[in-house]
Image: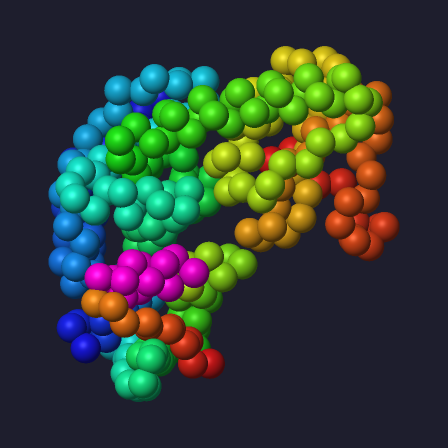
Amino acid sequence: MAPKYTVESVEPRIRRFLSPLLARAGLRLRYRVAAPENPHPDFENPEVVVRFTGPDVELLLANRAELLLALEHLTMEMLRMPPEDHSRLCFDANDYRALRIEELRLSALAAAEKVKRTGKPFEFNPMTSRERRIIHLALRDDRQVRSESSGVGSQRRVIVYPADRPAAPVVAAPPSLPQRRRR
Amino acid sequence: MAGMKELVEEIAKALVDIPEQVSVREVQGEQVTVLELKVAPSDLGKVIGKQGRTARSIRTILGAAGMKLNRRFTLEILE
């Protein structure tokens, strides 16, 4: 499948947006726009990666990479990327994304073990859609558990259930509401 | 103060369909500088975003920039 976004097609627009923004915000960061070498092809397959370096990388990654994700979100909105394309562009620094995928994968496996042992559902903290997707993918081959997302907006989170147990209405939702699809 | 008004203005202009109607007013307080962002009514959704995520992202950047200047900035989107 031909990529929808390439370095050549998006880099000029990204630079025109991001460079003045970083300068005005006083953030000491450099970045490169490149095609990815992807260590987790099962989980994320971006077509373009923006990698940051510089003295303010620590600030960029503080609070679960809040600033990195904010810059990524605004850049995607600036590029008018539809939500279903969002996994095609990825902002990163110090391999944060790969480390976070590994962390999420391990906590998904730990949660599944706990659910099997106790027979009770396990609720994760709220996560972004991309992070929730990694949890769902990590558990997709496990026949003994089932994962679903629940909640709205920034409060949306993954809940892992024993496979034979129907989902409990965790957040108050009208009973007529149709079952949400996974992720 | 050090270009924060322009920062918000430039971000907003990149997000909306009618950049000519973007304006930002800076209101200096003792502790906090309030940045009042105005856009065309049809562009409100573009600067707020789904579940407020775009507005929250702009606030995160203002927070980081403010930290460097030792000053707090808040963003108000005028409807």
Q: Is residue A49 visible to us here?
A: no
Left or right: A73 in relation to A137: left
* Residue drawn where x is 32% and y is 20% of the image: A38
Vertical order, A135 against A123 (above or below): above
Query: Is residue B52 or residue A97 the one in the foreground?
Result: A97
Vertical order, A104 against A81 (above or below): above
| Percent position of residue A23, x then y | 14, 58
Vertical order, B34 against A21 (above or below): below
Q: Is residue A24 magenta?
A: no
Asked which quadrant contains residue A138, the reply is top right
Asked which quadrant contains residue A17, the reply is bottom left
Vertical order, B12 against B25 (above or below): above
Instruction: Identify the colour scheme used.
Output: rainbow
- Classify the position of the N terminus of chain B by image quarter: bottom left
* Residue drawn where x is 26% and y is 25% of the image: A36
Query: Is residue A114 or residue A46 the one in the foreground?
Result: A114
The range drawn in magenta is B56-68
| Percent position of residue A127, x then y | 54, 41
* Residue drawn where x is 29% and y is 46% of the image: A60
